[in-house]
Image: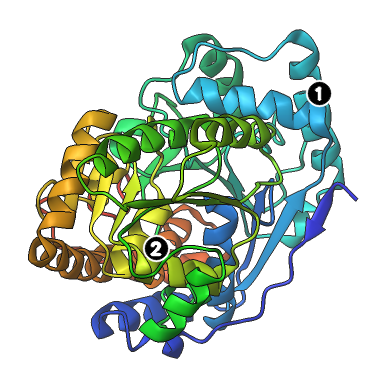
Amino acid sequence: MMLQEVRVAARSPSTFRPYANPGLLRRLEAVASRLQGARVLHINSARSGGGVAELLRGHVALLRGLGIDAHWQVLRADGAFFDATKRIHNALQGARVEPTVGQWAAFDQVNRRVARAMDARRWDFVVVHDPQPGAVLLQGARRGRAKWVWRCHIDSERPHRPVLRRIQPALRLFDGCVFSRRAYAFSLPEPKRAIMAPAIDPTAPKNMPMGLAEARRTVARFDVDPDRPLLLQVSRFDPWKDQAGTVQAWRAARRRVPGLQLALVGCSADDDPEAASVVAQVERQVRGLAGAFVLQDCVDDRALKAFLDCASVVMQKSIREGFGLTVAEALWAGRPVVGGRVGGIPLQVRDGREGFLVKDPAEAASRVVRLLRDPALAARLGRAGRAHVKRRFLLPRLVLDELRFLAALGDAPAARRATRVARRPRRRSRSQDHPTVVSLP
């Protein structure tokens, strides 16, 4: 089978009442009530290990709890395909790389097989995530009655033009495109576009409360000393996440804060062939250095919560970052964040308000030292970060934005019934990147 169903249990919107704004939940249920029974398919390339998979698990569960017939399917492919799509991903993020002729052929072939495997008659809406399945329409997928949406999670502000030109014909066939920031929305003349920042699920195990004593016992099982300061980075092992730069920042900071520990926590993504080389590079950097921990694929969600609760500072010093769900998760845990001044990180961390934005390892080290020496400042930024995520980056807001967009696109009967609610005016945000739908018809 080219497409494999990921089974997700429904989750009632009432689950989110302790966290989300009551007015937002009422609007969400009103839109969903007019889309009851609408059939929505999400397709991506990995069931675990990356931000898209993390997002879809809670997203599809809430859609189902709202009465939407939502499904999540993952395409299956071999290493040649993922080598090609990682090059496409890197090129859209600005790297001057291109797939080989053979890799483009592998990309087209898998998309052709996925297109043949799909039964578009089942769906009112099909949402395709990122470049991996992005050519299914070009490769012959039957459109059926469905409205098709391409969802880009990549920092595509400065894409490598030869690769962008190669994939644009496929993307122009979609009825709508969704980006995380306006700056990412490269020119696609036909589809309607929307801007929706991703969001975290506050009911996921890694985001639920944990007692400090349990957290300390948990990190100690990984040989981390809970009585010493800890600098934490949580992300896939990927060149764009710049774990190497975080190691440099840690080494500089610990010269001024003796005993500072470093934990780099990450996992392998099914569709990312570069992880092993990044892990090997980082392990070489920290070899022989006491207090550095490189933890790949050995920290489950509850243990990750323990690391977040025990961290003194969380760092996300990315070179490019579409959004960075791990930043929102750290802020939700009340940790101050030091992040790269790139992509979606400044949406979440406003410099000096929820943490600090930096441009290089030296500046990152300076900010880490400041936070470690001023616990009151760290606590204040942590409280502000949690409040910021609660206002803007929790799952019900994202699902509401998506349903509004689908309703405005759709010509299925259920979608037409929701159009009146979807077009209800919304107060303009003071921030041009406020998570919301734009460019509706």
Q: Amino acid at mark 2?
A: Leu
Determine whether 22 is above or below 324 in the image.
below
Q: First in sequence, mark 1 or 2: give its number.
A: 1
Q: Amino acid at mark 1?
A: Ala
Determine whether 221 is above or below 370 in the image.
below
Image-based side of 32 in relation to 88, left or right? left
Instruction: Tell me the residue at 70%/24% (across/down).
Output: 84
Q: Secondary structure at mark 2?
A: helix
Determine whether 205 is above or below 299 in the image.
below
Q: Is residue 155 visible?
A: yes
Q: Position of residue 64 (x, y in %)?
A: 59, 77
Image-based side of 138 in relation to 26, left or right? right
Residue matched to label 1: 106
Q: What colour scheme does the image use?
A: rainbow
Q: State the residue in front, 77 or 439.
A: 77
Residue matched to label 2: 398
Q: Position of residue 282 (x, y in %)?
A: 53, 34
* Count of residue discs: 2
Q: Using the rendered view, name the quadrant where residue 280 is placed.
A: top right
Neighbours of disc 1 within 10 Å: few (<14), some (14-19), many (20+):
many
* Mark 1 in CB contact with mark 2 (< 8 angstroms): no
Image-based side of 212 in relation to 122, left or right? left
Instruction: Tell me the residue at 49%/40% (across/down).
Output: 152
Neighbours of disc 2 within 10 Å: few (<14), some (14-19), many (20+):
many
Instruction: Tell me the residue at 25%/39% (across/down).
Output: 255
Q: Position of residue 380 (x, y in %)?
A: 11, 67
Q: State the residue in front, 424 or 298.
A: 298
Q: State the residue in front, 390 or 257.
A: 257
Instruction: Tell me the residue at 47%/52% (across/down).
Output: 409
Distance between mark 1 and mark 2 Cα atoms:
33 Å
